[in-house]
Image (cartoon, grey):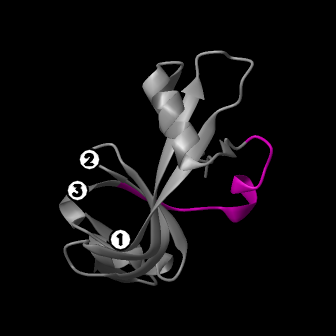
């Protein structure tokens, strides 16, 4: 699949150039969610993230409680292109909104996961184009 930019047809990996030096969320085939600043990529869609952390989201079974998330710091991270399911830019203003899950220390999120009082989830906020 190819992307068309300014009359040029670019390989799919080249379409990642718009995300360089931006904060992105990458969802991997194994279900993990990684957030970091995209610093580099290659023709195989291998990606280098800086200041990376794994985001773990839990939706409590009690619907009166808000969804929560915790971040596990990972640092500099290299991701194989064949393990990427979804890559998108993180909108800082949406992360700061009241509708976004609230951040807790990762220990509290893991305790909630282990207690069975919540469902581990992926929260995507994909806008209609």
Callout 1: SS: strand
Distance (Cα) linking label 2 and label 1: 23 Å
Residue 67 image offset from top left, x and y in percent: 64, 33
Disc 3 to disc 1, C-alpha distance: 20 Å
Residue 124 seen: no
Residue linked to disc 1: 3
Q: Is residue 128 above or below residue 78?
A: above
Q: Is residue 96 magenta?
A: yes
Neighbourhood count class around disc 2 (C-alpha, 10 Å): few under 14, some 14–19, many 20 upward: few
Q: Which is more N-terminal, label 1 or label 2?
A: 1
Sequence-wise, the earlier of marks 2 and 3 is 2
* Left or right for 93, reference 22: right
Front label number (2 vs 1): 2
Residues at badges 3 and 1 in contact (C-beta under 8 Å)? Answer: no
The reply to whether callout 2 and callout 3 are in contact (CB within 8 Å) is: yes
For the record, the magenta segment spans 86-99
| Residue 128 forms part of the magenta stretch | no
Which mark, by number, is residue 29?
A: 2
Q: Nearer the viewer, residue 82 or 58?
A: 58
Label placed on residue 83? 3
Q: CA distance from mark 2 to mark 3?
A: 5 Å
* Crowd around label 3: few <14 · some 14–19 · many ≥20 (10 Å): some
Left or right, 96 with reference to 74? right
Q: Quadrant of residue 46?
A: bottom left
Is any part of residue 51 visible from this angle? yes
Residue that appears at 48% across and 69% down: 36
Q: Secondary structure at mark 2?
A: loop
Residue at 23% x, 56% y is: 83
**Residue 4 in picture, x, y percent from top left:** 38, 74
């Amino acid at each position: 699949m190819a992307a068309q930019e300014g009359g040029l047809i670019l390989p799919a990996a080249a379409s990642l150039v718009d995300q360089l030096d931006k904060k992105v969320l990458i969802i991997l085939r194994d279900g993990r969610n990684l957030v970091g600043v995209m610093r580099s990529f290659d023709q195989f869609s291998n990606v280098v993230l800086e200041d990376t952390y794994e985001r773990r989201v839990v939706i409590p079974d009690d619907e009166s409680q808000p969804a929560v998330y915790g971040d596990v710091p990972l640092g500099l991270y290299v991701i194989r292109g064949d393990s990427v399911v979804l890559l998108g830019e993180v909108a800082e203003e949406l992360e700061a909104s009241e509708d976004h899950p609230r951040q807790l220390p990762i220990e509290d999120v893991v305790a909630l996961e282990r207690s069975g009082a919540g469902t581990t989830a992926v929260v995507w906020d994909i806008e209609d184009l």
